[in-house]
Structures are given as C-alpha cells and as structure tokens.
Amino acid sequence: MMTIRNRRLAPVVQQLALPLDAKPNRAASDRPVDVVLAAIVIALIGFGVVMVYSASAVQATLHMHDPQFFLKRQAAYAVVALCVFFLVGAVDYHRLYKLTYPVLGGVGILLLMCVVGLGHSGGGATRWLAVGPVHVQPAEMSKLALVCWLSYSLAKKADKVKTFTVGFLPHLLVAGVFMFLCMKQPDFGSSVVLLLLTFTMLFVAGAKVGYILGASMLGGVFGAVSIMSKQYRLDRWLAWQNMDQHRADLAYQPFQSVMAFGSGGPWGTGVGKGLQTLYLPEAHNDFIAAIIGEELGFVGILSLCVVFLALVARGVRAAYRAPDDYGSYLAFGISTMFGAQALVNLCVALAIFPTKGLTLPFLSFGGSSLLVNAAAAGILLNVSRQGMAAPAPELETPAPPRVAEDPLLDEPLFDAGARDDESVASALGEPSLLGDAASVKETA
Amino acid sequence: MKNLDPTRAKWIRVRMGLLSGIMALGLGGFVSSAYRVQVEDAASWKETAENQRQRRLHIEPKRGGIYDRNGAALAASVEVPSISADVVEMLKGIDGQNTQAAALIDFSTRIAGALGMDPSDVHQKLANRRRFVWLKRRVTAEEAQAIRDLGDVKKHGGAYGPGKGAVKGLGVEGEGRRYYPGRELAGPVLGFVAPDGFGKDGLELSLDEELRGRVEEVRGLRDRSGRLIFSEGTTDESSLAGHDVHLAIDQAIQRVAERELDVAFRTYETKGASLVVMDPSSGDLLAMVSVPGFNPNDYGEAEADARRDRAVTDRFEPGSVMKVFTVAAALAAGSLKPTETIFCEHGTYSIGNVTIHDTHQNDWLTTTQVLAKSSNIGALKIGLALGEPGLYAAYRRFGFGEPTGLPLPGEASGVLRPRARPWFEVETANASFGQGISVTTVQLAAAMSAIANGGKVMEPILVRKITDARGNVVREWAPHVRREAVPQAVAKTVTEMLTAVVEDGGTGVEAAMSGFRVAGKTATAQKVDPATGKYSEDKYTASFVGFVPADKPRLVIAVVLDEPMIGRYGGDLAGPVFRRVAEASLRYLGVPPSNAAPKIKNVKGSDADPSLVSMKPDEPAAAEDGDGAGAAGTPVAAAGPAPLAGPPLPSSVKVPDTAGMGARDAVRAVGAVGLVPVVEGSGKLVKQLPAAGSAVPKGSSVRLVFEPAS
C-alpha cells in the first residue's frame, strides 16, 4: 500500500520521501479531539484579541484615527486562525509529510525574496512580503516548516541520526540556510529560535551530544560575531547591559516594558486601564506581555505562564502518546516552538534577555504569526487525537489505569503543571507514561 | 507501521522529558523574576512610571486671563508654537555610526535654516540623541510652517539622503505665551510671567496658583511624544486651564490716571508717583497707578524699581492729609466742636525743646480753616486735646498701620508707632499732622473713602471675582464694611470742612472743578533724609487726597508724588492731577455736574484740557440740567470699555462756532454735538478746523488751536 501511494507522488517528493514508515491512521479520524488542548488554544487566541485591543487602542486612535484598527484586524485573523486550527486538526498528520519539501522549499524561496529586496520594510527590517493587501512574514512560517522537515527527516533516518554526515550535518545545513536568510532581513530572534529548535530536535532524536555541543559553541561564536559586526546590535546589547544609563535611548523599550510589569503590581490595574501603552512602542506586538503584566498584574502573568505550561505539557503528552516517531517529533517540535518562543518573548519583555523581536504565540498582534501558530496547534491536535487511539494496554505491561481508562478526561500532566513547575518536570519523566509508550510498541 | 525500537523510543522520551524540564525551569525562573518586579519592587516601579507621566507634562495648562471690570483683557495667554525634536525617531532607519553622524549634521543644517539658528547650536542639541529636546521655543508661524515642511514625507520623500528626505521626529507644539494688550497699562499691578510659566510680580505672582491651573486636577495624560491623551473621557481642555481674574479696575479710568500721573512725573521730575482711584461706596479700586511703570510684554527691559506697585509697597510720611483724620477723630470723640476756634500761636509753638512751625502765621482759626490753611499747630492742638490713645485708636480704625489685604505681593502696612510704644507728647503732636508715622497710598484712599461714604471703612477690592475657564465663579469679593471709623454726622461735617480746602484761600484750589464740589486735603510732607536722619529741606512728598462730588461722592482719588524736583506743594503739584483724573473719570462715568456747585471762572492751567479727549463725544448737554442724576450709572454700560474711541455715529452734524469761547466751553460745545475735540496748545482759542457751520460725520474730530494770551 505504501509503495502504491508513493508512486503517485511527484518525482521529486518520491525521491526524497521514500522510506518513512508512516501511514494514515483511518481509525483516528473519528476519535474525539483533545478538548483541553483545543480549549487552551481557543482561550489564548481570544485573550490575545482582547489584549491587542487594550494595548493598541491609544496608538491606533492617534495614528490611524480608529481605536479599533488593530482590534478589527486581529479579530479577523483570529476567526481565520480558528478555522485553520480545526481544519489542520482534522487532517491526518501522516498526510503532511508529502508537503514537507514543497513547504520547506516554498518558505525558503519566500525568505530569499525578502532578502533580495522584494520585501516590505518596516521598523528598519525587511520581514514582510506584500501579497496584495496582506503582508506575510516568511520567518514565522520558516519555524513550522523547519519543525515539519526535521520531524520527517529525523523519523526517516531513525538510527542513522547518530552519524555525522547523514544524521547531523544535513539538518544543520538546512537550518543554517534558514538562519542566514533570517539574519539577513535582519531578524535575529527568529534565527535564534530556529537554532534552538534544530538542536532540540536533534538532541531528542538521538544525535550525538558532542556534535550538538560543538555546534552550539560554533553558534555561540557566530552569534557573538554577528552581534559585534552590526553596530546597532552591539549598541543594543550594551544598552541592555546598562539599562539604567540607556533608559532614554536604546534601552527605552525594555525599560518601559519592565516599568509596565512593575507598575502593574500583584493584581494589575485592570484590563484597558494600563497607562504604559502610552510609552511602550509596539505594545500590541512584541511587548504585549508587558501590557498583560501591567493590566493583570503578577496574578495575570502567573496564570499566563500556567496556561502556556499546560499547552506545552499537553503537546509533550501528545508526543509521548504519538503512534510513531514522526508524530512524536512533530508534537514535541511544535510544543518546543510554542514554549521556547513564549519563554524568550516573556524574558525579553522582562529584560532578562536583550530585545529580539519575537512574538508571543497566539497573543501578539500579527496575522502571519497567528495563522502559523494556529496551523501548528492544529497539527498538535491531530497528533494528540491519534495518540488517544492507542490500543488498550496489554496484560504483560500494565499501564497506569488512570491513563488507560479514560485518556480524554484524565489530565495528570495539566493538573500537576498547574500546581507546580517542578512537579511538571517530574511528571514528564514519569515511568507510567513510558509504560504507555512501551505498550504501543507491543502492539506493533 | 510502528518504527519504534523500544530502547530508542524510551531514550527519546527521556530526552523529551529532560528538555521539558529545562523549559519548565526556565519558566520558573521567569516567574520568580516577575515576582520580584511585580510584587517586591512594585511600589518603586509604580513611582517611576508615575514620575514619567508627570515629568512629561511639557505644556502648562492654559493660564487664566486678567480682565478689567468691563471684561476687557489686561493679560491674556496665547498659544505660540515651539519646536521640539525626538532624535531617536529622527535617526530611525539610518544605519551605521558614520551615516548617522553625517545625517545629524545634515539635519542640523536644514533645521537651522528653517529656524534661523546657528547649525552648530542645533547640532549640539541633537548630539545627545535624546527622545525629547526643545530646539527653539516660541517661534513664528512661518518658522513653524517651515518645520512642518521639513517633516513632510510627501514633499521630501521618506528615504534619507544627503540634503533630501523628510526630517522625522520634529514636533510643533503650542506653548502658552503671556500677552498684555494694554502694554504699560497697569503694568506694576499685573506683574509678569517668566518663561517657565510662573508669575513673577504683581497679581501674576500673588494669584499665580489660581491663574496657572492645577496640574493635579489633570485627569489626562501625555504619551511619549507629549501629546495630551484623556483617559477618562474628558475632552475639555478648559478643565485644566487656569482661572480668570476679574479686576475692579476700569481700563478707561486707569488709562487716564496713568497718563496724567505720568505727565506729572515728567513735568515735576519726581522720583516716583502713585495714584489710587477708589469707589467709596463699594471699595472698588477703579485705578491703581505706579510710575514709572513698565511694559510686562518686555519685562526684561524694565528695572526692578519700575516694576513695583508703589501704591501698596511704598510707605511714606503722609503729612497734612492726616489732619483730616485727626479732626474727624476729635469730632467723633467730642474733644472738638465743629464751631471751635483754635489759637495757632502765630506760626511757632514749642513742645519741650521741639519747636513746630506753620507755613503761614495765623492767630485764631476755625476748625475748617485749620484744614483749609493746613495749620500744623492747629492740628497738633486738636490731637493733643484728643490724647494719645484716642488718636492712635482712631488712626487704627481708619485702617492705618495694617495692610489693606489686597492680593498684591509686598504690601506695606505702614507704621504708626515706629518705636513700638505709645507716643510721647511731641510724637502725638507730630502724628496729628502726619509726621513720624508712615502710610501707603492705598491706605490713604481707603481712609478718605470712609470720610466720603459716611464713616464706613470699606475693604479695598482689587479683584472682584475669580472664575474658572467655563465661567463658573470660584471666588467673589463683595463690598464689605470692615468697621465704622467715625459716625456718619462727623463724616458729613468733615466733608463740608474739606470742601473749603479747594475754595479760595485753601491750599487745594488747583483741585477745584467746574460743576462739581470737591472735598480733599493737600499735603506737603518733608522726607527724612536717610543720610542725616533729619527732615530734609528739599525732599518732599507732595500729595492730594480727595473725593468728588462732595455731597454724593463717586470717586476717591489719592495722588502721591515722591520727591518732585520742580515745585513742592501738594496743592500745586498733586491737585491738578486729581482734578484732571476726576474730570475725565466723572465724564466717563456719566456723572452730571451739579448746578449747586460753583462755576469756576478762573481755571488755572488750561493745559488741563487735553484730558478731555477722553470724554464721551456724545455726552449729553442735558447733563447740565442736573436732572440726569438718576441715569448717572447707565451711560457707563452703554459706553462700554472703550470710551476713547466712541462708536462711529452715522448722521452728520454741523461744526459749532467756538470763536471767543474759553477752552472748557469750546471743548464742551464741540463735544455736545457729537464731535471729538482735539486740543492743541494752551491759552486763547485762535483757530478751529473744520470751520464753523460745515457738516461733518458725527464722531469726527475737530482741531481747536490755542495760543497764550499775551
């Protein structure tokens, strides 16, 4: 059956996509979705629309003479994003691997178009491509494209991942090309995320830790050089180091952002009552977390962290339960993409990291980011759905009854994560879940 | 279908768990940082944020205006554009240290060209690369337009290139600038406002808080570019604006008084002079003049000496004016009968080892004559008969020795007992005729008002009301009787006595007016020479304080000339000022002359007549009939605040024949038919233009040329 399918593929894909041992799981399509995951995504998108409005109303009134300028757009994106989320969620992820190379190549071309000058400039960088009235941001797509390709390639190569020439170098080269193109825009933040994703997935798939450490060191040197080479990056870095001295110029944004967090206090000023939107440029975009911090206080930020943690935990749960490596890598890569971006964005907003230009997934204003993240969440939803199709535990390897009896309603990870960060870490490594994976193997 | 090797799958899961754990740890780290910022350091961050919003209130709320009693603006704030720059915004999109430096120089040159500044000055301001810097404050409309053009992307294009491309980050903001339409008018009373928005003198200083508007009332906020944002739905900037101050001063009377006092200041070469016009019935200060004055629009040009309001800040020994209050006090106390005669010792009288002289040697004088001839010896005998406690208490009742409470900075209270103990006999004697004590011009006017209005000491009112920017009254000063200084009958008696001062034989004949009975008192007080500590032989304070009409007083006018170089006597120097100001003001107020009043034939110094240009051209001749008393108040409102330029009257009139008339009658005749007399020269009327009988539009001017009789 596998070969028949492959024969129908376009020659290029046929050549590249041959030996993946994965096929659509027809039984999964009528399984119920992971309600918790879906609820988190929907809640985040909805919350994002509210916060974008709150953060942008003043600036929109001043510059666009329409307080709802950003609200209207974000609401429209949100509707489309929800459709994308459920549509992608309904497509068996096993079908996606055929799209891996076209998507990877397409995104690469889009990135190249940005760099060679077809892009649309804004804020000193060329990150957008104008397609009619819509501006798309290829860098956002590149993250998901890379995750999909790495999942596919790593799953396909299986044990060969341990080798340098087959398992390590090609992945690093593709990621390197993407990073280079992002860097050229310039979009330093996306490059960092791409590198992070690549290393994470290589590590998970079992690449030699020595290679990864070596490459990390190389990346560190390269990063340092690229910071040094561009004066504005160096200035920004130094300004971030001495924030107090540069609060009026280069560190203005991070300083105002921390001030927003701080003036929110434990309970916040209330939604729509934040005043730092007057001072914080891009409040509705990269620094939306600052406005959340100001308007909802520490309590709001803590809740937001818990929700993101739950999202990632739910994704990792899907990765654990995925019926195959491809699904597992996909789910984990996407979860990492959400988690790493959110964490970096939050840390930038609190000036723990220097300014990078990364969005907060699902919350920041912007169509490209929202749609790409919704699509990624859709894939995650589908992986989780198939994981639930895991057959009943065999007698020889009894799985914890809670997981097996009612996987849909049983949320040990989520509950644990909501209570305590540390317990999540331990819960993730819980043997009971490994037992579940073992049971999957037994059925094969 | 499964491609999971059990060991491999297990290790994959372990590694995933490890990475998830690291991520969770990272999140934990973030949460703990957030806890530190948001919970532990929240208060200090909140304060920083608040300071930032406060600090960025670049523009003061619009300062309130100062208006005269008819609503004419004496001080107003107008918005004048100022230019600021956001250098970070300016350099956005220009990469590279060298390119930016070059761009900055280029921008500086172009901005300097637009603002007419030195490019290196501009560059210096931009070099710090601040987010906000003033480039030039208070620019002209053309300069503001030039700056807007520089920032116009459509005109210059968005991209930067040497000498082209729009200059970003330039801001044009309105800033308040104080403007005094009347120029020197009431300058020392009004004071001025420094560029930082704080009032520095006069009412601008003392009412600064009210005028400036309150920042803490501001519910709106400014964003990082200084724009005003209203957070709570308030869209009315007037809620931030300062209060308006409405004065009792009448611009027209103030103007006349200033002109006349200035003439006296120049003519007699005095060191300074002050004048107060008060309405005795209400205490309203209709005019308050201090010369030399200054123009608050160019306060930098004026010396500090010219900026102070002498009428309240300068105290001086009043001299003979105090005899009025001595007599009033003695009459009220019963120690003096109105009909009493007093032996005046032929001009020389000794108390202990001090000898006191009179200017004229008199023997027996009635009380009225003591005032009319201004006998020191007569006054001191009255004072000594009253006794020290009685005299001191009476002076205090009239308001001397304490500030009048005007809202002006630096008001002097005057000193009654300079040694802080009751007077000795000789001091009581001196005080009886105004020596050894000090008063202010405003105090004299207020005390004389008490004589004029039947004994009531009124609170002097400079500010009638303060309203907020929407017109609601915030504070109001209604006429307020402070106390009764003397009984009404005594005040009436003293008034009658004071009319004798301006009659033939009195010291104040120069103050007499045709058609009005004048009551008043002259004073020529020697000044203490600070070098010797003794009374100087050639330094005097010449003054006249009086009111008119004597039987129904409308105006109290106190004129004080400090150290005239030419002339000496209060009657000769201050009297004419009183008369001219009174004449013009009464005419302006529409007070009809009384038939009962003496027609004075021999008006000295017909140069007084130029003041009549301020009369209302259509002053009805009917006023001569004396029946216009009831309507006296109404013409004021009809005339409005600008009586100097009466409304053009449509119909044409015939120019009357003034041949052979006196100056006064000629002016009156011309004024009666609705023409404006313009007087040139003095003496006999020799020429009239246009000629008699020609028809001219009402309101046009008629030149009357006079020449000395000889």
Image (cartoon, rainbow, N blue to C red):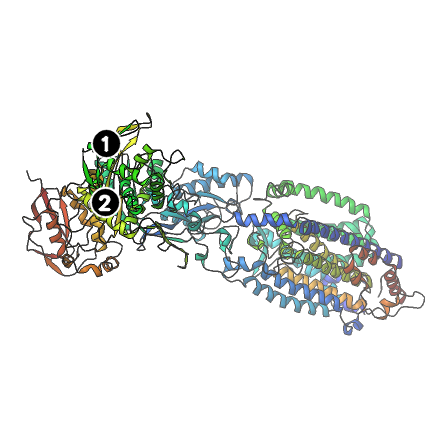
Q: Residue furthest top?
A: B532
Residue type at tag 2: Gly
Circle 1 sits on which residue? Answer: B565
Of A248 and B87, the residue lying toward us: A248
Chain at tag 2: B
Disc 2 to disc 1: CB gap under 8 Å = no
Of A351 and A124, the residue lying toward us: A351
Residue type at tag 1: Met
On screen, residue A111 versus residue A133, left or right, reads right
Circle 2 sits on which residue? Answer: B520
Q: Residue furthest bottom?
A: A30
From this view, report whether residue A19 is shown above or below residue B707.
below
From this view, report whether residue B146 is shown above or below residue A385.
above
Quadrant where the N terminus of chain A sits is bottom right
Chain at tag 1: B
Residue A161 drawn at (x, y percent): 81, 53
Is label 2 on the same chain as label 1?
yes
Q: Secondary structure at mark 1?
A: loop
Rendering quarter of residue B593: bottom left
Residue B188 drawn at (x, y percent): 33, 42
